[in-house]
Amino acid sequence: MIIPKDGDKIKIQSYKHNGMLHRVWEETTVLKSQSNLLIGGNDRVRVCESDGRTWRTREPAITYFTSNYWFNIITMMRNDGVYYYCNISSPFIVDDEALKYIDYDLDIKVFPDGTYKILDEDEFDIHRRQMNYPEVLQKILYKQLRTLEQWVQQGKGPFNPEFPEKWYEYYLAYSK
């Protein structure tokens, strides 16, 4: 696996379990990179969907990827507070093309007041049947969903109130 340097610009590619490309974020600035962790930042970045649609993100975001857990976290700085969108996913890898992971549909959206909602359980149910997710994989994914909920409740990792501010400052420094 390639370990990008701080300040590098990389693409992020998400796939589905069947290997099909799901979504591509065209550019993210690497803020911190280690073998098991990558923190990035972007703002109004172009996103390409598998069906060819493109759109731009609406606000600055800090991305958190770890190879120690089966999830990634997007911290979004909006005018009315910090939101989080968390994907249950495979651990990430980085090659010469992009940072890559498999998106397993289950998501958690966290609101500025700390409340959260689990999303897309219906989509997960459809895809687990269509793509024949093994039972062991399903157990891993639900266990990771519970771990992610604990992180939210405990203010751990990116949910620590200091995280968004610190890493957004780093992003602004690299953007100059």
Image (tube, grey):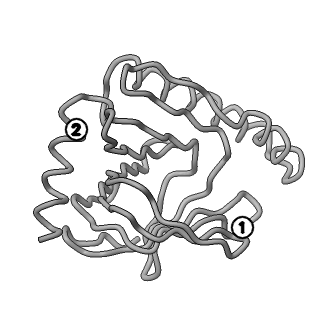
Above or below, 121 relative to 37: above
Query: Which sits in the foreground, 155 or 81?
Result: 81
Q: In which quarter of the image is the C terminus?
A: bottom left
Q: Where is residue 40 in the image (x, y as percent from the top left)?
A: 30, 59
- Asked whether, in this view, residue 105 is left or right of residue 111, the answer is right
Question: Residue visible at 39% across and 20% down?
Answer: 114
The amino acid at mark 1 is Gly
Label count reads 2
Foreground pick, 96 / 9: 9
Position of 83 with respect to 20 (left or right) is left
Q: In the rendering, at what x and y percent does residue 8 appear?
A: 25, 75
Give the left or right position of residue 103, taking residue 111 as reference: right
SS at circle 2: helix
Is 93 above or below relative to 163?
Answer: below
Is 175 displayed left or right of 154 in the figure? left
Residue 106 sits in quarter: top right
Q: Residue at x 20, y 50 (%)?
A: 168
Q: Mark 1 points at which residue?
A: 19
Q: Position of residue 148 (x, y in %)?
A: 48, 29
Classify 51 as above or below 146: below
Q: Where is residue 125 in the image (x, y as percent from the top left)?
A: 82, 38
Q: Which of marks 1 and 2 is in front?
A: 2
**Residue beneath disc 2:** 163
Identify the residue at horizontal 28%, vertical 67% (top origin): 29
Could you tell me the amino acid type at mark 2? Phe
